[in-house]
Image (cartoon, rainbow, N blue to C red):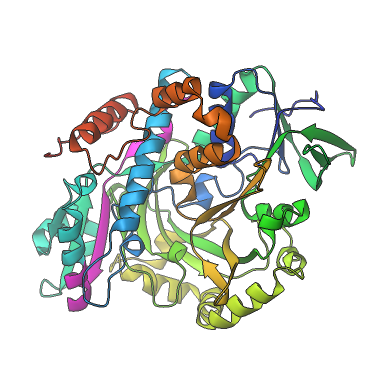
Amino acid sequence: MIKSDRSFEENPDVVLIGAGIMSATLGLMLKELKPDVKIEVFERLEVAAAESSDAWNNAGTGHAAFCELNYTPQRTDGSVDISKAVNIAESFELSRQFWAYMVQRGFIKPSFIKSIPHMSFVWGQNNVEFLRERYTTMQKSALFQGMQYSEDYEQLAEWMPLVMEGRKKTDKVAATRMEIGTDVNFGALTRDSFSQLHEMPGVNLHFGHEVKKLNQDADGFWHVKVKELSTGNKRKVKAKFVFIGAGGGSLPLLIKSGIPEGKGFGGFPVSGQWLKCTNPEIIKRHQAKVYGKAAVGSPPMSVPHLDTRVINGKRELLFGPYAGFTTKFLKKGSLLDLPLSIKTGNMRPMLVAGIKNIPLTKYLINQVRQSPEDRLLALKDYFPNARQEDWELELAGQRVQVIKKDPKLGGVLEFGTEVVSSADGSIAALLGASPGASTAVGIMLSLLERCFPERFKAAECQAKIREMIPSYGKSLAADPELLNEIRSYTSEVLELNNLQPVNS
């Protein structure tokens, strides 16, 4: 475990709040682009990646949009919109390239990522027709070529035996499969990244430290007041740039910053639970991430999946997540988080979004009230022969969905990831949830471009970015040859399955 530094740099260039995957990614990028940059990291818990980045707290899919049906909505005319899936898939390729670069530099080991097939599974005539249309449409993009589709019982039983056993051969079912899917342990990746940052000159990590206040002076510098939780000692640091990457804790800090761009933002917390398989024989028989369709009215993060994971070197099998509601913004947060986040500036957007999303609230309450028998019934949709005694309940992570002002609607609830930054680029906060961690590299590149525009555009910086991320500035979706080259490179370095070339 990384130990907290005792030394402080009182006038660092950068302060990173939160020791999750976002801060780790930004910190490493900054040190590669400007090795002499001075960084102070503050984390309220005693270890890195203990909240949303932890393996038990997130889906860990390595979201490449291969299997997540909520990224490919069906239009009213029956066609399928894959634009969001294309953007996410391209962004995940950026992450793979940056991770491969870090492995080659000796910063991290590739053990955090494993090859696991990604599958989508549906039943019922309408859903089968949707999945068939989705598959046909996705084949038009080089990013998804190599995807397989089947409605054949025997083929599906070979792909996912647990899912098919106990079903009638006359049932109308279908699935897609991508062999190049991955499982990513973002907790392990984050901790390895901070271990590397800890070894770099000019970086200090402070665990058990909570940021209490942020104020900007007339010269544009941020004064960050920090409390050491074990002693109660307080101190201030003065920084040119602050990044708030504190997961569910980002919204309260954004509000405290007082920047105009942060006014009107609110948060809607959604909790989750997994069913964790305890039977080794069952775990051995499933080797895939099988995603279905979310229930009507449910948040996208609750898309059900029967999920093979590799956590701490051990194969695991999870099902869920089962959504829930709490007023906490963090798994280890306070029940007062939600009420204390309601301010004059965001009250109306939050009230309007709340009224418009009453069905979602009812859904979450019903999820909280589920009995073990109810959860087993949901599991049986994906594993008909499941038995209660083979599964135990595991608490998942906490997500805070973004509520923002809307000129026409008053307030809207969003289910993505959003970076909010000040006009002068001196502070930025990351809000929201999925697909967050999987697209961290793309998100941080956008942040760097927005907050450090002159340095980012410099020839030296651009060259370094292309060294770290060879496809930067190019569209992999529009260039199958480059896509083949990039995937071959990252697969070799990250020790993932070899890929079949995509036809140009």
Q: Position of residue 314 (x, y in %)?
A: 42, 39
Residue 165 can be seen in this image: no
Image point (68%, 53%), residue name: 249
Depicted 293 relative to depicted 36: above or below: below
Q: Nearer the viewer, residue 421 or 120?
A: 421
Depicted 301 relative to depicted 240: above or below: below
Image point (37%, 68%), residue name: 379
Q: Position of residue 11 (x, y in %)?
A: 80, 27
Image point (53%, 34%), residue name: 25
Q: Quadrant of the N terminus?
A: top right
Q: Nearer the viewer, residue 254 or 282?
A: 254
Residue 231 left/right relative to 349:
right
Q: Position of residue 204 (x, y in %)?
A: 71, 26
Point out the stretch of residues depicted in magenta. 108-130
Q: Quadrant of the C terminus?
A: top left
Q: Nearer the viewer, residue 363 or 264?
A: 264
Image point (39%, 48%), residue name: 61
Residue 346 left/right relative to 126:
right
Q: Quadrant of residue 225?
A: top right
Depicted 159 relative to depicted 46: above or below: below
Residue 490 can be seen in this image: yes
Count of numbered circles on the image: 0
Q: Nearer the viewer, residue 371 or 454?
A: 454
Decide whether residue 155 is among the magenta residues: no
Q: Quadrant of residue 142?
A: top left
Q: Position of residue 310 (x, y in %)?
A: 40, 41
